[in-house]
Amino acid sequence: RVDQKGLPKSKRYGIGELLRMVDLKRATYYDERKRIANKLDKYADIKIIIKEIGKVAQNLLNQTFDATIPYTVLHTDVSQIRLGSSTWTYMSIILDQALKRF
């Protein structure tokens, strides 16, 4: 939108139109703007403690994901899901690389 700064308001793209173009939900956009504007990190103290006690695991796989023995290479991801009751829950799925079929 910076390149549109000199244009009259009627000729500029609206934020809704830009969000549709990049397929980003309005709520996500405004939530991120709020995070950027709020520079106070309420978890700053905790993050320092975690860095002091958290261990970094060795990179044993070296980006080689061709396991053939079950339970030697596992992948996981955590997703946040909105339930029908408008509450949120978390789901973590673990995939075994050796059992993965393409």
Image (cartoon, rainbow, N blue to C red):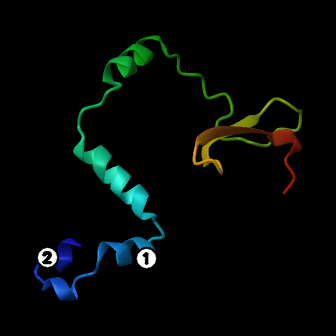
**Which quadrant holds residue 20?**
bottom left
> Compared with residue 98, is residue 34 higher up or lower down, i.e. above or below?
below
> Residue 53 — which label?
none
Q: Nearer the viewer, residue 22 or 63?
A: 22
Residue 13: x percent and y percent? Answer: 28, 81
> Compared with residue 78, is residue 42 higher up or lower down, i.e. above or below?
above
> Compared with residue 8, is residue 93 higher up or lower down, i.e. above or below?
above
Residue 78: x percent and y percent? Answer: 63, 39
41 relative to 60 in the view: left or right = left
> Residue 5 — which label?
2
Quarter of the figure with the C terminus: bottom right
User: In the image, what residue occupies the spot 89% across and 33% down?
Assistant: 69
Residue corresponding to mark 1? 21
52 relative to 1 in the view: left or right = right
Determine the secondary structure under disc 2: loop
Looking at the picture, which amino acid does disc 2 mark?
Lys
User: In the image, what residue occupies the spot 41% across and 12% down?
Assistant: 52
Residue 76: x percent and y percent? Answer: 69, 38
Q: Nearer the viewer, residue 55 or 59?
A: 55
Determine the secondary structure under disc 1: helix
Q: Nearer the viewer, residue 1 or 81?
A: 81
Q: Nearer the viewer, residue 61 or 51?
A: 51
